[in-house]
Image (cartoon, rainbow, N blue to C red):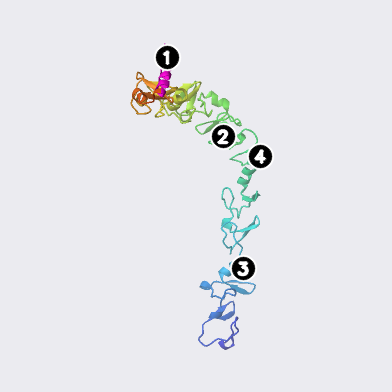
Amino acid sequence: MSLGLMVCSRCHGGFQPQEQIVNSQGEVWHQECFVCCQCFRPFPNGIFFEFDGRKYCEYDFQVLYAPCCGRCREFITGRVIKALKNNWHPHCFLCHLCQVPLSDQGFFSNAGRALCHDCNTKEKAAVSGKIICVKCRGAIDEDPLRISDETYHPYHFNCSKCGVELTSDARVVKKELYCLRCHDNMGIPICGACHRPIEERVVHALGKQWHVEHFVCAKCEKPFLGHRHYEKRGLAYCETHYHQLFGNLCFVCNSVILGDAITVFKKAWCINHFSCSFCDGKLTSKSRFFDFDLKPLCKKCFEKFPAELKKRLKKQYEKDLQERQFKQN
């Protein structure tokens, strides 16, 4: 078709000689007429989207017709996943728990969430209070077999020695599984804490055998790791908590008193911390001191008190002195 016979598809006007024109899918436009039908602006980089015979720039097409992703909230211009009353990019449609892509493997709707098969099985088991087998992903109705903090149906395994199908009381020795009878015949010590075989160093204490990392203080639960422990009533304690529970702590520094202690007023002091509560002068067990609000008071500070108060303090002192002498005898 000659230039003189062509007309612009938008304004229906003709074209001037040497004028640049736009040709798209057999239709022609003036350059200034080839614009978005919504915002009337030229198409950025010449990219446009066509719907129902009308051409739109990318932005207006998305606003008018493109669905919004339920995860990233951006427009979807390619493949759309429709699920859970929403639209998704394929790469945004993930398992709610483990984040594995679901666009090509299917999903399960669980409490308004999209879950993969494994996570859905775990969630159902959690609701029913059951444990999941790591191997078959099925719920374990009876006691599980625990291997390296993971749970299995015991019947998935056989004893490495006699070949019998295992039960939940099977033992692991050097990455090999044994039934309880075969294990006991091997003479391997069992940890008193976790009840599992001890393959390396053994701690003998409290009439039992322990993994090094499982022999811990009954109070703070920190492993002794070869350090000294103290036994009391069938339990083991670290030095600090043994003295804290059954020994003396200094009233001033709150540290364990390992040597001699001065005990008065139902309190204990380190020898270096026993001092007058007023002047901080150092006192000894042989020093003359008075009870002032259950704290030691030296003789010099005592003399500065009013006569009536000194009289009451002296009376209490004589009473305490008699009690201490009685206990010593």
Which label sits in the foreground, 4 or 1? 1
Disc 4 to disc 2: CB gap under 8 Å: no
Residue 91, picture quadrant: bottom right
Q: Which residue is mark 3?
A: 64
Which label sits in the foreground, 3 or 4? 3
Which label sits in the foreground, 2 or 1? 1
Seen in the picture, residue 205 relative to 10 is either above or below; the reply is: above
Q: Amino acid at mark 3?
A: Leu
What is the CA distance from the residue labelled 2 to the residue labelled 1? Answer: 65 Å
Q: Amino acid at mark 2?
A: Arg
Q: Amino acid at mark 4?
A: Ser
Locate residue 293, reporting x and y percent: 43, 26
Q: Which residue is mark 4?
A: 128
Disc 2 to disc 1: CB gap under 8 Å: no
Q: Quadrant of the image for the C terminus?
A: top left
Label 2 or label 3, whichever comes before in sequence order: 3
Q: Give yes or no for residue 99 being in the magenta stretch.
A: no
Label 2 or label 1, whichever comes before in sequence order: 2
Residue range of the region highlighted in magenta in the rendering: 308-329
